Image: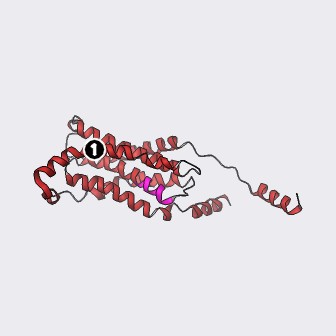
Amino acid sequence: MNRETQQVILQLAQNARPVRPLRRPYVRAAVWVVISMIFVAGMVLIIPADHDLLRQFAERSFVIEQFAALATGIAAGLAAFVTVIPGGDRRWALLPLLPISLWLGSLAPSCFREFTRMGTQVFLVPHSLWCLPSIVLLGTVPALAMVVMLRRGAPLTPHLTAALGGLAAAGIGNIGVRFIHPEDVSVMLMVWHVGGVMLLCAFAGSAGRHFLNWRSIIGASENIAR
């Protein structure tokens, strides 16, 4: 070992800082779900609902739909946390596909009956334009919490990670919207709610490199350490 090598080793040892390992992805996902659901539940209590929630829960289709949306949010959140672990299995990104399929399946029968009865006229049925903004509003805190927690990992695939995080936050936000403003299942509901969630997912994915930039995260960490 020459003198230069010893110098490098000594310098690395002097500059080394203790690293606190991240908790397992399912633990972090559970913490995120609790934070998100507390916020959504609070908003549901604050914003007066124009219906009877208990009667709504008596409808099996509504319960299945909300369960599937919740499962989509949880699965996407878990997958997002896995992607910020170097060497993590990328196949976890496929996890949300199953609950999304269940979600679409819970809406499909009613949409199919409506389309069979009305044809392309279903796309002319008036629908509240506040659906997408409401999903964004109720998904704000879940999204912010997700970004903060993801930045503690290593977002080496920022677009994929952000898309999964956006899907998780929008899925949770959609649950709150359905509680506050329930509507009969229709083609336009699928377009605005499910389509809106997917649109927000795509937007988050496209902007992922801006708020999950690995180099900027490392630089910020080094500045804090100094």
Please check the rendered image and state whether residue 137 is part of the magenta-colored stretch, yes or no.
Answer: no
Going by the image, does 79 lie left or right of 61?
A: right
Question: In this figure, which residue is indicated by the disc labeled 1?
Answer: 105
The quarter in which the N terminus is drawn is: bottom right
Task: Read off the magenta span.
Answer: 158-166
Local crowd at mark 1 within 10 Å, few (<14), some, or many (≥20)? some
Task: State the residue at coordinates (62%, 63%).
Answer: 219
In front of the other: 21 or 159: 159
Residue 125 in sight in this render: no
Q: Give, as a three-letter code, the residue at label 1.
A: Gly
Q: Is residue 30 above or below residue 131?
A: above
Q: Residue at x 15, y 52 (%)?
A: 115
Extreme-left residue of the structure: 117
- Horizontal side of residue 77 vs 59, given as left or right: right
x and y percentages locating residue 208 in the rendered image = 47, 61
Q: Position of residue 97 (x, y in %)?
A: 38, 47
Q: Quadrant of residue 202?
A: bottom left
Question: What residue lies at 52% left-to-right and 58% top-to-bottom?
Answer: 157
Q: Could you tell me which quadrant the C terminus lies in?
A: bottom right
